[in-house]
Image: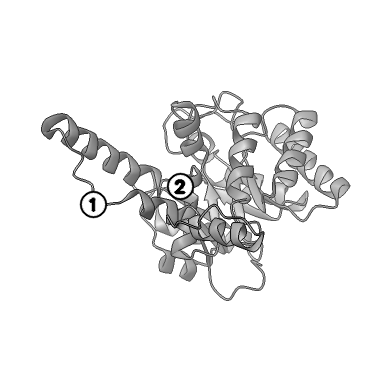
């Protein structure tokens, strides 16, 4: 799909069924299951490597199967959750879940969000072993899942080391790369040039450590995919917090959204059709 598109693939970050349903209703061509959002929504925890394979796979599977014939889902796979044997299983589980692609990074196992300070990365050989495990697993499964090699080494080891790591990952068979946490727009543009024609994905985190790069700017730079990790999580926080504060102060929520509006977004009409076509009568009296 990426090869055939004449424009950048835009993937909003989704973290649960509702945010994914909203992305589908808006009409995006792809979605991104955010690790930060999964930690926050499923576990109520900060993005510090607390969610593991089971948490991430279950969430990714639910999101990818809301509309199995719909837009592809890219999912966060953090560090792969272990050594080569665990990474092999992680890829297998993502493949069976219906995930179209995932990124795996070079942080230490006790990782953190890519837009926090204090990140540590493993040595390059350990990183490359993670990539090799992914490539071998995909080949064994005859899977076309897209392997995205991500490096978080910029903060501690500099730009040149990032390019070296991504080139090694490319040579080992990774399909795409992410250089996390660009310090400038010029640096982002240079990375695309230094790794061309290998495709790069841009992780756009507004209010993170990197400058804001719009979809149009990213396309002009030559990025093939752009993910917005906090596109649903951040506004959800603001909206929920404001509503709860309003409820606490005034005794009502002030919402103008009806229950049916939410249910319609979450597939009510499709479910009604399924029931009717099967001869069911669940909705004979309407909704």
Question: In the image, what residue occupies the spot 58% across and 39% down?
Answer: 59
Q: Is residue 71 visible?
A: no
Viewer-closest of 224 and 44: 44
Viewer-closest of 284 and 151: 284
Numbered mark located on residue 256 in the image:
1
Q: Is residue 61 above or below residue 47?
A: below
Rendering colour mode? one colour
Q: Is residue 217 above or below residue 174?
A: below
Horizontal and vertical percent for residue 73? 60, 53
Viewer-closest of 35 and 168: 35
Q: Is residue 240 left or right of residue 186?
A: left
Q: Secondary structure at mark 2?
A: helix
Viewer-closest of 21 and 107: 21
Can you name the residue that lies furthest to the right here? 140
Q: Quadrant of the N terminus?
A: bottom right
Question: In the image, what residue occupies the spot 71% across and 47% down?
Answer: 169
Q: Residue 270's quadrant in the figure?
A: bottom right
Neighbor class of circle 1 (other Cα within 10 Å; few <14, some 14-19, many 20+) is few
Residue at the spot of label 2? 18
Horizontal and vertical percent for residue 100? 67, 54
Q: Is residue 114 above or below residue 29?
A: above
């Amino acid at each position: 799909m990426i090869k055939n598109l004449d424009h950048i693939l835009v993937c909003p970050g989704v973290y649960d069924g509702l945010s994914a349903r909203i992305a589908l209703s808006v009409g995006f061509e792809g979605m991104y299951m955010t690790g930060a959002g999964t930690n926050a929504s499923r576990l109520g925890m900060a993005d510090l490597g607390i969610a593991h394979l089971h948490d991430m796979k279950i969430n990714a599977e639910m999101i990818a199967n809301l509309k199995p014939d719909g837009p592809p889902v890219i999912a966060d796979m953090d560090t792969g959750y272990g050594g080569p044997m665990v990474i092999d299983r992680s890829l297998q589980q993502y493949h069976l879940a219906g995930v179209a692609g995932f990124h795996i990074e070079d942080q230490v196992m006790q990782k953190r969000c890519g837009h926090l300070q204090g990140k540590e990365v493993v040595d390059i050989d350990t990183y490359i072993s993670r990539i090799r495990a992914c490539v071998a697993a995909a080949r064994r499964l005859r899977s076309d899942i897209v392997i995205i090699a991500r490096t978080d080494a910029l903060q501690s080891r500099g730009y040149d080391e990032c390019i070296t790591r991504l080139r090694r990952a490319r040579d080992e068979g990774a399909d795409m790369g992410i250089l996390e946490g660009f310090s400038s727009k010029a640096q982002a543009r240079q990375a695309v040039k230094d790794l061309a024609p290998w495709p790069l994905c841009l992780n756009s985190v507004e209010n993170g450590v990197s400058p804001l790069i719009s979809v149009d700017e990213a396309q002009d730079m030559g990025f093939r995919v752009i993910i917005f990790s906090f596109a649903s999580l951040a506004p959800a926080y603001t909206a929920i917090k404001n509503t709860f504060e309003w409820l606490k102060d005034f005794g009502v929520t002030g919402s103008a959204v009806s229950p049916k509006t939410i249910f319609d977004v979450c597939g009510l009409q499709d479910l009604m059709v399924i029931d009717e076509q099967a001869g069911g009568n669940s909705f004979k009296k309407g909704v």
